[in-house]
Amino acid sequence: MKMKLSLLAALLVSGSAHAQQGNMTFFVTSAGAGRGADLGGLAGADKHCQSLAQAAGAGNRTWRAYLSTTGAKPVNARDRIGNGPWQNALGDVVAKDLSELHANPRINKRTAITEKGAIVNGRGDTPNMHDVLTGSRSDGRAFIGSDDTTCRNWTSSGEGSAVVGHHDRIGLRDDAESKSWNSSHFSRGCSHDALKSSGGDGRLFCFAVK
């Protein structure tokens, strides 16, 4: 009888977790695309988000990677992700709309979890993986200028650089950039090893478009 009750409890917990993931509209990818910052452009990055969401039971929505691009026709990350609200796999709301997302979001190590509901290593953990690719300014818009802020619009795994944010909101200093979830500093390069060297793993923020 005890075994049956334990099994029932496990099934109920599993069902509840699966239901929460089905309502998920925000996550940090549980893994990078495997080629550093070469994501296959925006289309490849979106596909990566969609595939991970599908595997987690939330593939009934359209998912977009929070990434900006530069050039003659720049794309702003904030214009790609809908209007919110957004919640993680455990049901925690990280922002109710675009204004809150870019002014005072509830994004931190506890809430910026993967599509599986797992915590992502942050500063102080081994290895540190708090750098998340964005290529964006703090307001969610693309950079204007000659510097490479997007690893050649997410097609380079060699030369170049990309702007990253800190999902745990912690950095080397006690300033706005170190605490920024979407615009903290430049990467040391575009390869997987270069991203790892400054505390990254080629991960992305994924948002469901409503």
Image (tube, grey):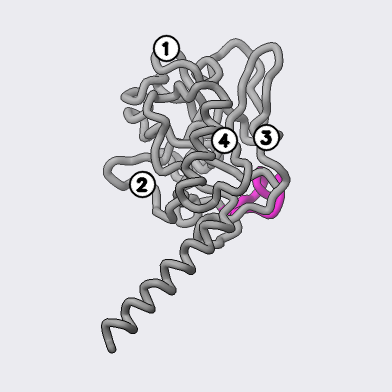
Query: Badge 3 is on which residue?
Result: 80
Q: Provide the residue designation for mark 2.
A: 121
Q: Identify the residue shown where x is 33% and y is 30%.
A: 196
Mark 2 is surrounded, within 10 Å at the Cα level, by few (under 14), some (14 to 19) or many (20 or more) other residues, namely some
Between the residue at mark 2 and the residue at mark 1, the CA separation in whole angstroms equals 26 Å
Q: Quadrant of residue 4?
A: bottom left
Residue type at tag 1 = Glu
Residue 45: image location, x then y, percent: 52, 30
Residue at point 38%, 46% (across, down): 122
**Of residues 67 and 6, the one drawn nearer to the viewer in this rendering:** 6
Answer with mark 4 or mark 1, whichever residue precedes in sequence: 4
Tell me the mark number nearer the camera, choosing from 4 and 1. Answer: 4
> Residue 159 bears which disc, if any?
1
Q: Amino acid at mark 3?
A: Arg
Secondary structure at badge 4 equals strand
Amino acid type, mark 4: Ala
Which residue lies at the image location 52% right of the left edge and 15% below the top edge?
152
Q: Which residues are magenta?
A: 94-106
Q: Quadrant of residue 23?
A: bottom right
In the picture, the disc for residue 65 is 4
Horizontal side of 166 relative to 105 (left or right) equals left
